[in-house]
């Protein structure tokens, strides 16, 4: 990829892994001890789809659960090698996930991206960039990762990515810098005009490791297995007497 930056990513995947390790080295001993306490779970194999919802999003989350039961459970109930992070607004559209699962097996992580108009540089607070010791220039060429729908194959790469992501969440200066602004303007293209918190951090980590081009996943035909329905409420759970 052509660029006008004074520095770029490292020359290969493993060197970029080493660069991301420096993020973790910035965290204090409390973070390291917290992460070590969960290491004994690393070999556990179980089927997981992870989401989170506040009270206001309870009915929206029912739509996600409904799509899982309709499309996935009948076919993939015995498949234990993946963890899928899905926003409450995500909806599975198909029960044919083989292409997605095989992609993540080959590349460790299946993620989707936005265009450069939603660049990581625009949507990451300056304090976070400084904390990670990253510069803005190279991240102007890459759109954010769609943090609402990410498939992790259980391997060493994904463990490293999730550990780095979660450890950053435990340090205020890393993921939640003071006075950061969530709301972004499409009319403002300046670096650091807003901050997307967990989405900003995941985007920086994944783009540091995967930057062959802006658009991911690297497939000839789009992987169309989900959609996002913001604000869509569903009554799926049984009504309690």
Image: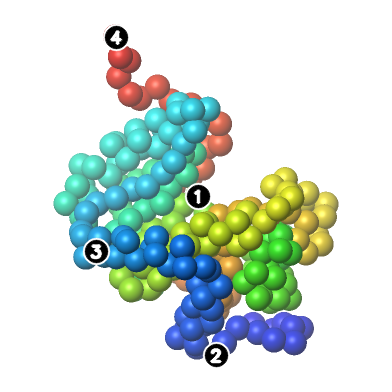
Q: Secondary structure at mark 4?
A: loop
- Which is in the foreground here, disc 3 or disc 2? 3
* Distance from Cα at disc 4 to Cα at disc 2: 61 Å
**Left of 213 or right of it: where is 159?**
left
Near mark 3 (Cα within 10 A), the count class, few <14, some 14-19 or many ≥20, is few
How far across and how far down the image is residue 199, in percent? 57, 56
Residue drawn at x 51%, y 76% as measured from the top left: 25
Where is the C terminus found, in terms of image quarters?
top left
Q: Quickly name the residue at label 4.
A: 241
Q: Secondary structure at mark 3?
A: helix
Q: Quickly name the residue at label 1.
A: 148
How far across and how far down the image is residue 92, in percent? 39, 44
Q: Residue furthest left?
A: 78
Q: Identify whether 10 is placed above or below 84.
A: below
Residue drawn at x 49%, y 83% as measured from the top left: 18
- Which is in the foreground here, disc 4 or disc 1? 4
Q: Quickly name the residue at label 2.
A: 11
Q: Is residue 234 visible?
A: yes
Q: Residue furthest top?
A: 241
Near mark 2 (Cα within 10 A), the count class, few <14, some 14-19 or many ≥20, is few
- Which is in the foreground here, disc 3 or disc 1? 3
**Left of 172 or right of it: where is 217?**
left
Q: Residue furthest bottom?
A: 11
Q: Are marks 4 and 1 in contact (CB under 8 Å)?
A: no
């Amino acid at each position: 990829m052509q660029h006008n930056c004074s520095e770029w990513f490292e020359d290969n995947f493993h060197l970029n892994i080493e660069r991301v390790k420096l993020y973790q080295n910035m965290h204090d001993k409390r973070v390291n001890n917290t992460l070590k306490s969960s290491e004994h779970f690393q070999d556990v194999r179980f089927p997981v789809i992870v989401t989170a919802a506040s009270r206001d999003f309870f009915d929206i989350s029912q739509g996600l659960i409904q799509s899982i039961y309709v499309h996935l459970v009948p076919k993939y109930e015995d498949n234990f090698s993946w963890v899928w992070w899905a926003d409450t607004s995500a909806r599975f559209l198909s029960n044919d996930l083989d292409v997605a699962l095989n992609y993540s097996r080959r590349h460790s992580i299946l993620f989707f991206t936005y265009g450069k108009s939603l660049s990581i540089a625009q949507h990451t607070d300056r304090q976070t960039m400084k904390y990670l010791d990253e510069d803005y220039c190279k991240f102007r060429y890459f759109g954010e990762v769609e943090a609402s729908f990410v498939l992790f194959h259980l391997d060493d790469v994904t463990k490293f990515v999730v550990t780095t992501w979660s450890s950053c969440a435990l340090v205020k200066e890393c993921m939640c810098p003071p006075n950061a602004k969530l709301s972004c303007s499409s009319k403002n293209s300046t670096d650091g005009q807003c901050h997307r918190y967990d989405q900003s951090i995941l985007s920086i980590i994944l783009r540091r490791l995967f930057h062959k081009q802006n658009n991911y996943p690297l497939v000839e035909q789009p992987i169309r297995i989900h959609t996002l329905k913001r604000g869509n409420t569903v009554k799926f759970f049984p009504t309690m007497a």
